[in-house]
């Protein structure tokens, strides 16, 4: 599954969700198709979901809400683990991704 | 009548590096993508003006994120008219003032929201708001822009609402500053 525009690309490989580019969509409705892709990975009930954000240069606060909402959905399913991969060279990730861990302490966050 | 919330005092002096621009309502047909393009431009502009002891990549990103969140709100809630942006950098302090018009009803709702917001610890409120958004399938906006700026970026924010005649709406000036490092 894949959504691709001039600004960003989101795609899945097994239970890994990859994000790339700049996502500054206008709100919950605009992010809905992306959430749908993410939810379809969760629906397959894998042992571990990986969100790979290492190529996501920019995300607005509505996009942070999307990641947070999905983290809460995963939290409801204790058998499904979650790992978030970030990059130190992308400033928003060191600033905002720790919020996901505060929402779901079992989430494994690696910013390297 | 003028009503102020939060920190509305400008910090930078007349000696600061300044950049001002107006996003004209016409003929631009101001829309969502102007927010990102403008924020990236101003982030790039000031990251090149920073001193050597400031991380230019972090500065470019932080300025761009802050401006984008405030401009997205300005574009979403504006009641016609232009959007004025005044930005300045002095030593490690970057600050902006963004002015636009909103309608009186939007102003009242926003003021009530600010009163609650300014009484609480932003990090705590951010998590609460995220949990509320997750429970409400009908919520269309996230309301996380201001909270992430305060909690994750340490931004100082203020809002000034000025109204003279009801028919003209309310002039909202958003003040925001960041300490770059």
Image (cartoon, grey):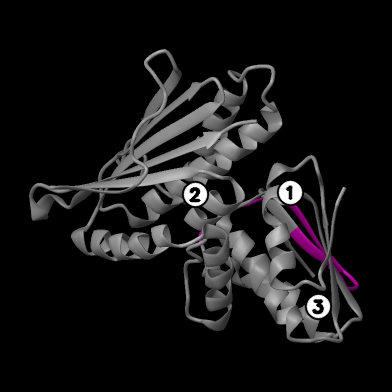
Instruction: Using the image, determine if residue A30 lies above or below residue B84.
Output: below
Instruction: Using the image, determine if residue B97 lies above or below residue A24.
Output: above
For mark 2, does the 10 Å Cα neighbourhood hold few (<14), some (14 to 19), or many (20 or more) residues?
Answer: many
Residue at position x 37%, y 15% in the image = B14
- The secondary structure that most of the magenta stretch takes on is strand
Residue at position x 56%, y 33% in the image = B179
Q: Chain of mark 1?
A: A
Q: Report helix, strand or loop for mark 2.
A: helix
Query: Is A61 on the left-hand or right-hand side of A55?
Result: left
Q: Which is closer to the viewer, label 3 or label 1?
A: 1
In which quadrant of the rendered view does residue B153 lie?
Answer: top right
Question: Could you say which disc has been placed on residue A94 in the image?
Answer: 1
Q: CA distance from mark 2 to mark 3?
A: 30 Å
Q: CA distance from mark 1 to mark 2?
A: 18 Å
Q: Which residues are magenta?
A: A10-26
Asked if residue A22 lies in the magenta stretch, the reply is: yes
Which image quarter holds the N terminus of chain A?
Answer: bottom right
Circles 2, 3 touching at the beta carbon (< 8 Å): no
Same subunit, tags 2 and 3: no
Query: Is A45 on the left-hand or right-hand side of B71?
Result: right
Q: Which residue is mark 3?
A: A41
């Amino acid at each position: 599954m894949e959504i691709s525009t001039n600004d960003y690309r989101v795609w899945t490989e097994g239970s890994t969700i990859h994000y790339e580019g700049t996502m500054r969509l206008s709100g919950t409705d605009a992010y809905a198709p992306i959430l749908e892709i993410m939810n379809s990975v969760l629906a397959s009930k894998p042992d571990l979901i990986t969100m790979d954000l290492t190529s996501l240069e920019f995300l607005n606060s509505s996009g942070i809400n999307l990641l947070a909402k999905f983290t809460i959905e995963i939290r409801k399913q204790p058998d499904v683990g979650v790992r978030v991969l970030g990059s130190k060279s992308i400033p928003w990730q060191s600033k905002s991704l720790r919020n996901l861990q505060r929402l779901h302490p079992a989430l494994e966050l690696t910013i390297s | 009548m003028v009503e102020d919330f939060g920190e509305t005092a400008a910090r930078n002096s007349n000696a600061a590096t300044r950049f001002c621009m107006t996003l004209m309502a016409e003929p631009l047909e101001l829309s969502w993508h102007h927010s990102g393009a403008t924020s990236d431009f101003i982030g790039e502009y000031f990251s090149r003006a920073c001193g050597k002891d400031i991380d230019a990549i972090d500065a470019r990103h932080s300025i761009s994120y802050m401006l984008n969140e405030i401009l997205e709100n300005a574009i979403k809630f504006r009641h016609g008219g232009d959007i004025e942006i005044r930005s300045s950098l002095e030593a490690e302090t970057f600050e902006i003032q963004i002015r636009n018009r909103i309608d009186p009803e939007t102003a009242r709702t926003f003021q009530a929201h600010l009163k609650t917001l300014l009484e609480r610890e932003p990090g705590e409120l951010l998590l609460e708001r995220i949990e509320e958004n997750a429970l409400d399938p009908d919520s269309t906006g996230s309301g996380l822009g201001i909270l992430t700026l305060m909690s994750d970026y340490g931004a100082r924010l203020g809002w000034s609402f000025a109204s003279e005649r009801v028919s003209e709406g309310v002039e909202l000036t958003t003040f925001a500053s960041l300490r770059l490092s």
